[in-house]
Image (tube, rainbow, N blue to C red):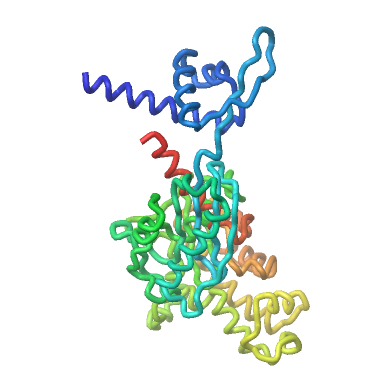
């Protein structure tokens, strides 16, 4: 008898989830159309819908068209049943957003990291920003179902901490998840920031039609998120995609990179700007800035637009490293799409064309190599995608 009851409970949960998923996908639908779509009996569908209406997961929004007889009552998913919060720490301008259960952004805040990038100060700033958002959106305050934090580094799933994150002081092994869970009393999910960006592009951006893709972020550091057969691939230690640690030249095996990987030491945004500053005196950039330390990617882009040869050669050297990285990824994974994101996008097609040309020469098969569509919001949308997946998996627990 217990087994039968358990089976009945499982069937009911499965049907409830099927109905919610179908209503979400369709937008609006009647009970009769649901029964037909799911091949379930009308009484079973009606019973489950009554439960979902009581739970406030579905709502009735009025009458639909009728082919004769009574007009059907249309159902719609209640996207305000709950909310998720996403936090993206992937760049100097960190982002926090509040979203509904359809992934629509309700509130969005940017904040700068503390100057010393101290881990405890960062977590305190996150807490302050979230409280500020919730104070301004009281309707969501008691309906937060998950918080997703995207952080640089490798996630330790057992300890729920971050390691190998040299960008932040004291961030390694800081109990980020536990601190936020204690503060807000909701499930907190900790994920690598680049993995979230890959999920963001796969669910909401240029990767929606791709089953096998890599998202490569070139920013303060370099990393990638990998989607294989439509699912995030993280590897045995949740460290898959840490391509900043790729060795693009054998001579680099002898060097010490002080916590950074060989590739990001040569081809990240700070590395590029460091090399451009060396040639600034002989370039057009010298006309626009007095101090080479003030050079930004915008200056580099303008110099490339103006045909500055010294800057072009410097960018071409960086492009070679990135071409090696994309070619190596392709040789191992046989992807159909490689997306490049991060601050490096400022260089526009000057860089992208170089990478396509150089990598295309040595790749065994050539995927499409394009820039991110979601740009700096890829991580936030990925946080929503990951958070929402968690919420809907546990909706009927």
| 173 shown above or below 144 | below
Quadrant in the picture for the C terminus: top left
Could you say which is closer to the camera, residue 80 or residue 19? Answer: 80
| 50 shown above or below 233 | above
Q: Residue at x 62, y 26 (%)?
A: 61
Q: Residue at x 60, y 81 (%)?
A: 273
Q: Visible in this render: residue 53?
A: yes
Answer with left or right where residue 273 lies relative to residue 35.
Answer: right
Where is residue 128? Give x, y as percent: 49, 64
Q: Residue at x 45, y 43 (%)?
A: 389
**Which residue ends up furthest to the top in the rendered image?**
69
Quadrant in the picture for the N terminus: top left
Could you say which is closer to the camera, residue 231 or residue 42? Answer: 42
Q: Quadrant of residue 343?
A: bottom right
Q: How many marks?
A: 0
**Which residue ends up furthest to the right in the rendered image?**
306
Answer with left or right where residue 69 lies relative to residue 249.
Answer: right
Answer with left or right where residue 150 lies relative to residue 9.
Answer: right
Q: Residue at x 22, y 22 (%)?
A: 2
Q: Visible in this render: residue 327?
A: no
**Which residue ends up furthest to the left in the rendered image?**
1
Q: Quadrant of residue 192?
A: bottom left
Where is residue 168? Give x, y as percent: 43, 74
Could you say which is closer to the camera, residue 245 or residue 342? Answer: 342
| 183 shown above or below 57 | below
Where is residue 369? Give x, y as percent: 60, 58
| 258 shown above or below 160 | below
Where is residue 396? Give x, y as percent: 39, 34
């Amino acid at each position: 008898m217990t087994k039968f009851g358990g089976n009945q409970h499982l069937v009911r949960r499965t049907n409830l989830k099927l109905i919610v998923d179908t209503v979400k996908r369709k937008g609006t639908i009647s009970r009769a159309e649901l029964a037909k779509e799911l091949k379930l009996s009308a009484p079973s569908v009606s019973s489950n819908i009554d439960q979902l209406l009581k739970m406030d997961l579905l709502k009735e929004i009025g009458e639909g068209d009728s082919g004769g007889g009574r007009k059907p009552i249309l159902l719609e998913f209640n996207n305000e049943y709950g909310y998720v919060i996403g936090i993206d720490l992937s760049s100097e301008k960190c982002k926090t957003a509040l979203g509904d259960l359809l992934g629509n952004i309700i509130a969005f805040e940017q904040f700068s990291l503390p100057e010393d990038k101290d881990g405890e100060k960062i977590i305190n700033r996150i807490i302050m920003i979230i409280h500020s958002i919730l104070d301004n959106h009281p309707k969501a305050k008691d309906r937060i179902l998950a918080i997703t934090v995207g952080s640089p580094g490798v996630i330790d799933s057992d300890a729920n901490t971050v390691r190998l994150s040299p960008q932040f002081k004291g961030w390694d092994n800081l109990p980020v998840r536990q601190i936020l869970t204690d503060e807000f009393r909701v499930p907190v999910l900790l994920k690598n920031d680049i993995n979230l960006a890959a999920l963001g592009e796969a669910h909401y951006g240029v990767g929606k039609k791709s089953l096998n893709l890599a998202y490569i972020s070139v920013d303060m550091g370099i990393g990638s998120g990998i989607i294989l057969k439509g699912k995030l691939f993280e590897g045995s230690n949740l460290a898959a995609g840490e391509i900043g640690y790729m060795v693009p030249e054998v001579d680099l095996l002898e060097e010490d990179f002080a916590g950074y990987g060989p590739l990001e030491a040569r081809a990240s945004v700070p590395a590029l700007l460091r090399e451009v500053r060396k040639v600034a005196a002989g370039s057009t950039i010298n006309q626009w800035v007095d101090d080479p330390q003030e050079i930004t990617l915008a200056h580099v882009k303008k110099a490339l637009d103006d045909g500055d040869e010294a800057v072009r050669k410097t960018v071409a050297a960086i492009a070679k490293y990135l071409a090696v990285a994309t070619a190596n990824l392709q040789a191992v994974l046989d992807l159909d799409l490689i997306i490049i994101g991060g601050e490096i996008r400022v260089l526009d097609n000057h860089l992208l064309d170089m990478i396509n040309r150089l990598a295309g020469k040595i790749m065994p098969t050539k995927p499409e190599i394009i820039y991110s569509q979601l740009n700096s919001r890829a991580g936030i949308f990925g946080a929503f995608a990951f958070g929402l997946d968690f919420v809907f998996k546990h909706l009927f627990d």
